[in-house]
Amino acid sequence: GQQVMQIPQYQHVQEGEDFTTYCNSSTTLSNIQWYKQRPGGHPVFLIQLVKSGEVKKQKRLTFQFGEAKKNSSLHITATQTTDVGTYFCAGLTGATNKLIFGTGTLLAVQP
Amino acid sequence: EAQVTQNPRYLITVTGKKLTVTCSQNMNHEYMSWYRQDPGLGLRQIYYSMNVEVTDKGDVPEGYKVSRKEKRNFPLILESPSPNQTSLYFCASSSDRGYSPLHFGNGTRLTVT
């Protein structure tokens, strides 16, 4: 079936290091959304990308949508302890109009 | 304040005892959905609803029921809970399916013994 794979599952960084999580789909996506879930919390919407090759920035966070609209990435520059949490991508499949969540990447930041 | 309210936050029950997790949103959203979150598996959709009286199965619907009698409410019903339904459950809503941000409730941690 349609899947959205996310890697890595877990990443541990020192504060100040950069971090990237990748999302890959087996099918073309209409759009991709990114969510952040703090420990013990619920997923919170960060951003949506729609266009092929689109790049959006939110302060230290940079989001990209691949040219083929099958992959996406979230890059955090100079991580801070407030970045701790699980980051999920969610892709809207064109064929079935389903929003499929990736498995998430848990980010731990050591001060 | 715009929000999705889920209750209860924590629930411990025994196998076979029917339970309902409530979900209510105050944003007049048409689309509502239930997810379960398990380690290493991410968020998996249980059921969703496009509007009042319109519900459909997600990826893992077995053992669950839902209803959408009013636009704001979307309860999740476990008629006969089993231990494999022990999980963290989230209700979410949005103004449309997939093109608008999902707003999540605070979650319900369910343990079935």
Image (cartoon, helix red, strand yellow):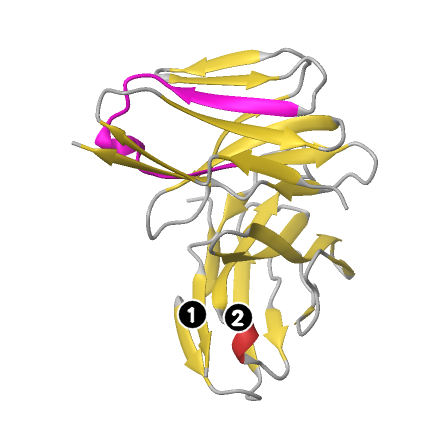
In this view, the residue in front, B90 or B85, is: B85
Q: Are marks 1 and 2 in contact (CB under 8 Å)?
A: yes
Left or right of A73? Residue A79 is left
* Badge number at residue B21: 2
Residue at 69% x, 67% y is B67
Q: Quadrant of residue A23?
A: top right
Residue at the spot x=58%, y=88% of the render? B16
Image: A78 above or below B76: above
Q: Secondary structure at mark 2?
A: strand
Residue B50 locus on image (x, y percent): 74, 50
Provide the residue designation for mark 1.
B8
Earlier sequence position, callout 1 versus callout 2: 1
Left or right: B105 in relation to A28: left
Residue A105 location, x and y as percent? 45, 38
Q: Can residue A10 be seen from the camera position used here?
A: yes
In the foreground, B62 or B26 = B62
Looking at the picture, how far across and down is residue A29, in whole percent? 72, 28
Q: What's drawn in magenta, residue-wise? A: A71-88
Residue nearest the viewer, comparing B84 with A41 = B84
Q: Where residue A4 sits: x, y (%)?
A: 64, 38
**Left or right, B25 with reference to B58:** left
Amino acid type for the residue under numbered disc 2: Val
Please tell me which residue is depicted at 66% across the width and 42% down the height of the picture: A100
Would you identify the image quadrant in which residue A48 lies? top right
Q: Vertically, is B113 above or below B98?
A: below
Give the class, few, some or many, for how many residues have Cα within 10 Å of label 2's Cα (few <14, many ≥20).
many
Kind of residue indicated by mark 1:
Pro
In the displayed orientation, state which residue is furthest to the left: A111
Name the quadrant of the C terminus of chain A: top left
Q: Secondary structure at mark 1?
A: loop
On the same chain, marks 1 and 2? The answer is yes
